[in-house]
Amino acid sequence: MARILIVDDSIVARMSLRSCLPKELHELAEAADGAGGVALFNSFVPTLTFLDLTMPGMDGAQALKEMKQIRPDAVIIILTADIQKRTIDMVNELGAFTVLKKPPQKQEVLSVLEQALQAAGANNG
């Protein structure tokens, strides 16, 4: 069973993403901001993380940076409406697994989820 962390300040975005995930296969945890996400990342130890970029307080880029310092092999999928090349380049440089445009489509989430779980398994194997 995979442990999936969802970090997004929008409850609607978290609910939408949660509805795309097969509930019977995964244990889910959620945080509403970057600082809470980093704290939960430490205690929950997710197999993979879905992380929003634009949040009040600690934004997703800073949270990504801190999560990768804690676990350099962490599989972190960025969710953002900002798909500018410089933003995508920045999160890739920080170690994001991939970037999904918000709102993500269910098939896209499931496809990326499968790839991410394979990568996480390779990292942990």
Image (cartoon, rainbow, N blue to C red):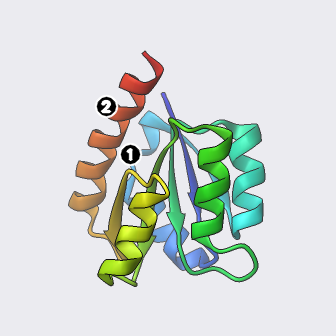
Q: Which residue is mark 2?
A: 118
17 horizontally vs 38: left or right = left
Q: Nearer the viewer, residue 97 or 108?
A: 97
Helix, strand or loop for disc 2: helix
Q: Quadrant of residue 65?
A: bottom right
Percent x, y of residue 59:
64, 74
Residue 60 place in picture, x, y as percent:
59, 69
Q: Are marks 2 and 1 in contact (CB under 8 Å)?
A: no
Q: Residues within 10 Å of mark 1 (few under 14, many from 20)?
A: few
Front-most of residues 62 and 79: 62
Kindly identify which numbered label has been placed on residue 3: none
**Quarter of the image containing the C terminus?**
top left
Q: Which disc number belongs to residue 22?
A: 1
Taking the image as shown, residue 125 lies to the left or right of residue 51, namely left
Label 1: element kind: loop
Residue 109, image x and y in percent?
Answer: 30, 57
Q: Image height check: is 122 above or below 72?
A: above
